[in-house]
Amino acid sequence: MTAMSDSSRKRWLALIVLCLGDLMIVLDTTIVNVALPSIREDLAFTETSLVWVVNAYMLTYGGFLLLGGRLGDLYGQRRLFLLGTTLFTLASLACGLAGSQGLLVAARAVQGLGGAVVSAIVLSLIMNLFTEPVERAKAMGIYGFVMAGGGSVGALLGGLLTDALSWHWVFLVNIPIGVAVYALTVILLRESRAPAGTARLDVGGAVTVTASLMLAVYAVVNGNEVGWTSAQTLTLLGAAAGLLALFLALETWVRDPLMPLRLFRLRSVATANVVGILWSAAMFAWFFVSALYLQLVLGYSAMQVGLAFLPANLIMAAFSLGLSAKMVMRFGIRVPLAAGLALTAAGLALFALSPVDGSFALHVLPGMALLGIGCGMAMNPVLLAAMSDVPQSESGLASGVVNTAFMMGGALGLAVLASLAAARTDRLLALGADSLAALNGGYHIAFAIGAAFAAAASLASAALLRAAPQPAANSLAPAPEGETATPSPRAAR
């Protein structure tokens, strides 16, 4: 009993470490945004060049997610997690010490590479640590809370660090976290990898899919600046589509494909990725557009914006850390996922009705509450659906695929919604509306379409996932330490 207790305690400590490592990555996607004005002033960025502080990170992060997951399967997930953590931590140090534009942008690109490797592998490490259904549901709830709430915490932390110290500290704060994560990972996690000689890296697939993703991300993040119908944007998107088609063709005949297409024959995997694309587009609309509404329309400070998200974060914590797992064990995946996404759509719809002179209690808190409940309910089921039917030898790949779906859906969705919001604002200004009303009208369009995305994801999950309850807690015995039991196929349907 003592040995089992120690083993269980070690697994939960390892989960905390893994979540802390991934929290660094999630925080970094938003914490930097608050510091951008200070970075611009200190390093003399122009309006055009400043965008590369964000885009350099997104480019490498989006491009290497899929490859990072597969490398973990082939060469050891713990080894790649440690490598990604090291790259991210050293790049954070370089960012924090940067005294020139070139060094900061280059270090941000390396940060994105390290972040992609960590994000692509952490989900599979968690799934392999927790094989018993009740524990797995709880663990995925904790991970889901970190994923869902990290962005909001980043805005608050970014404001605190920038105001109290300087912009350098939004990067330097990662150093002690990264060192602690590395050391504790070495202590708490053992290596697991495919047997030697069983597979080799699909170089052609790696090159084509990474180039395709990087071109697509580049086209998306620059779409608003150069125009969505410009020759540059259309050429880049066309090249990305061509490379993706070549990648899919390669995967059908190579012996050891980077992404075995048979994974998508699993209904749960295919559905989870479609839902992830739609939902991440809605979530990006919520976080970024609502932050703009609070700051530019209602006049909130950066600190107040972070505090405004606190109710949603607390509600997500309650669901993700306990209630969501109980719902999954009672109702299976389909019901809480569809219901959570429907509540997310309702929360965004409320924001689409928010007025220029809105108050927090009447026009912000209700939407935040619904979004907190919805995201807290849905995050655990969608991750379980994406991972539970996948064999351990391909868990890193599946983790990379679902993370890529979330990232690409969010980036593309946000870029499109931001473009539509800007067009609506310009039209209202041309019609004589004042600046605040025009801004708010543009945000309404973004919120409304985000609500439509979430509603579509809810319908897709309700229609495509099978209605089957999670297996009973005793139906899947935990594997001995260092081994992984095969999850029941019913667990993710």
Image (cartoon, rainbow, N blue to C red):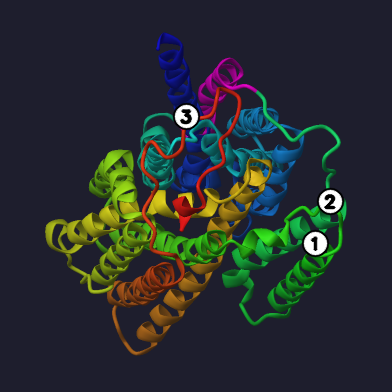
The answer to whether residue 441 is seen in the rendering is yes
Q: CA separation, marks 1 and 3?
A: 33 Å
User: Of the numbered discs in the image, which one, if any, rests on residue 251?
Assistant: 1
Q: What residue type is labelled 1?
A: Glu
Q: What residue type is labelled 2?
A: Asp
Q: Which of 158 and 62 is in front in this view?
A: 62
Q: What element carries label 1?
A: helix
What residue sits 56% from the left and 25% below the top?
Answer: 178
Q: What element carries label 2?
A: loop
User: Of the numbered discs in the image, which one, if any, rests on residue 202?
Assistant: 2
Circle 2 packing at 10 Å, graded few (<14), some (14-19), many (20+), is some
Is 188 part of what is drawn in magenta? yes
- Boundaries of the magenta span: 166-190
Q: Residue 116 falls in which quadrant of the image?
A: top right
The spot of residue 89 in percent (x, y) is: 61, 29
Q: Nearer the viewer, residue 268 or 118?
A: 268
Q: Is mark 3 on a helix, strand or loop?
A: helix
Q: Which of 182 and 193 is in front in this view?
A: 193
* Mark 3 lies on residue: 15
Q: Residue 189 falls in which quadrant of the image?
A: top right
- Left or right for 122, reference 295: right
For the residues bearing labels 2 and 1, Cβ distance under 8 angstroms = yes
Q: In this view, does 207 lie above or below 147?
A: below
